[in-house]
Image: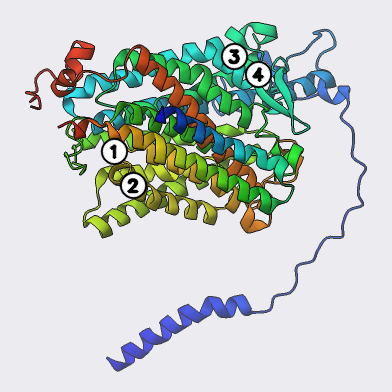
Amino acid sequence: MLILIGILVTLLGFLISLFSLTLSSSVGGRFALVVVGLCVSLFGIIGLLNKQYIKNAIWKKG
Amino acid sequence: MKTLHRLLLGLVIAFCLGPLGFSQTPTAPAATPAPAPAAAPKAISEADLANAPVPTPDARTKGDADGSQTGTASDITVSDAKKGITIGDLANQVGQNKIAINFVWTLITGFLVMFMQLGFALLETGLARAKNANHTMMMNLVVYGVGILAYWLIGFSIQMGGVGAIANLGGTPPLNAEHVITLFGKPFGLFGQHGLFLMHKGTYDVGVMVLFLFQMVFMDTGATIPTGAAAERWKFSAFIVTSFLFAAFTYPLFANWAWGGGWLSNLGANFGLGKGYVDFAGSGVVHAVGGLSALAIAMILGPRIGKFTRNGRPQAILAHDIVIVLTGCLILAFGWFGFNPGSTLGASGNGGLRIGSIAVNTMLASATGLLAAMLYMWIVYRKPDASMTGNGFLAGLVAITAPCAFVNPVGAVLIGLLAGVLVCISVSFVERVLKIDDPVGAVSVHGVCGIWGVISVGLFADGKSNYGGSWNGVNGSVTGLFYGDASQLVAQLLGVATLVGFVFVMSFVFGFVIDLLVGQRVSAKSELQGLDLPEMGAVAYPEFELKAEM
């Protein structure tokens, strides 16, 4: 389940960046939204997906 | 003695000042000839062509030792032997020569890129342990065959089926069908539709063949990146399916958006963001796509047995042959002279003469990447680590791949320098913080430094390049933030967001499904024994005595 959430959050980051094209017409506004989208995607990968895999990592099993 | 010294001193002074005095002696200005009256340009006539000096057949039978009689007007193909050479024949020959130069350039640089497969094979195999050498080498060989087949079947069509005219290759007119949707009131190209099997809709075409070969070896460079991150624990059957999907769908889709006329390349024309997403030779398209796919697979696979202690501390697993690792790095650097300069798709026309600048930028960035990584390791860890120095070398090359055609030499030096430091920090971060086992540093070299390369276009592009007057359908030269165009940086960042948020997810979902269906990882027993015997049926070095881990 957490893996699915991680995938969805990572995709959400991409969508935020994509929608910057229509949500803002200024370069600064688009820049800010794209950076927010990137951060969300990175959180999805590092904070959710990877965390889930580390939880069951082979080295924790001894 | 004193007199001798004075004499010598006098001679030295006279010798030094002599030329100076000579150069400062005013000389009479040379008589400048009066400018000749401008003559009206004379049009070439058919009579001129008929009278062009050509060697006689007799003279040719005697041989042409000095080369003055080979390649003359007699070698121009005539359309009508009775008429002899016409201006039309001459013009056609000039056109064909231009395209021939570009075909030969693109093919030879493509062959150089193909040679990079060997570089990757040696690099990855050397960094693996001896008990996995056959398996690692085989992955690097087989990815070539699987990649070609998948790309020929469908990948090329998705990537380039709607690219439109490529003037340097004679127009490639059959590649003219891009699937387009409307989003935010603008056309969004999603994938190409012509070119299946290189037969579909007129794509059995000389120009298309050249383009296919060049793009295929690029795709295969990307496809071979995950084999490094997944080395020593990847099930061979899962690797084959993953590579097929990469070559057929993951890579071509993003490559279409960036290079095939897709929506990212049109961010400039449709949304006023610089010249659209710009990635000259593929820091993003090839390396970041490969690096992010490697990250997805490495996460799914998990670390090798023994890589981390029970409390999560990383352990060094040593490379079995640093000689072939560094040989591989040098082969890769050699191949990169095909990768970057070849991406002009020609040496004649449309700014093709920038190939020298592109090659020099490539060389400079590799040097600073190498030195930066070496110095970083030397300062931080007290030794100039060989494998990290090699990775810094490659990091500089990966980073300069996108901007090589748009930056000046100083920009190239800085881009490589930062990449060399970045790769060292990133390798440490991936291992110590993310606890991801990447035996060759593929995620850092190709993923992280590929992304850095994409961003660096938006910073360092100096606005001096000119490839036919426009880029991605927007007039003018690609110009980054430091030279006055902040919107180019936004276009680049949107490309990065697509890589991280979409391409990674696509790779991860493919990898996850394969894991569920066939399993991605070999058994613990096979891993401890080494993959050569259980997976491939033979060890790489039969005379060696290999010790299985307990």
> Chain for mark 2?
B
Q: Which residue is mark 4?
A: B192
Mark 3–mark 2 contact, CB under 8 Å?
no
Q: Nearer the viewer, mark 1 or mark 3?
A: 1
Q: Position of residue B407 (x, y in %)?
A: 58, 50
Q: Which residue is mark 2?
A: B429
**Circle nearer the N terminus (3, 2):** 3
Is circle 3 on the same chain as circle 4? yes
Q: Which is more toward the observer, B121 or B508?
A: B508
Alpha-carbon distance for marks 3 and 4?
Answer: 53 Å
Q: Quadrant of the N terminus of chain B?
A: bottom left
Q: Is residue B343 left or right of residue B95?
A: left
Quarter residue B241 falls in: top left
Q: Which mark is residue B326?
A: 1
- Upstream in sequence: badge 4 or badge 2: 4
Q: Which residue is mark 3?
A: B61
Which chain is home to disc 1?
B
Up/down of B511 relative to B84, above or below:
below
Proximity of marks 1 and 3: CB atoms separated by less than 8 Å: no
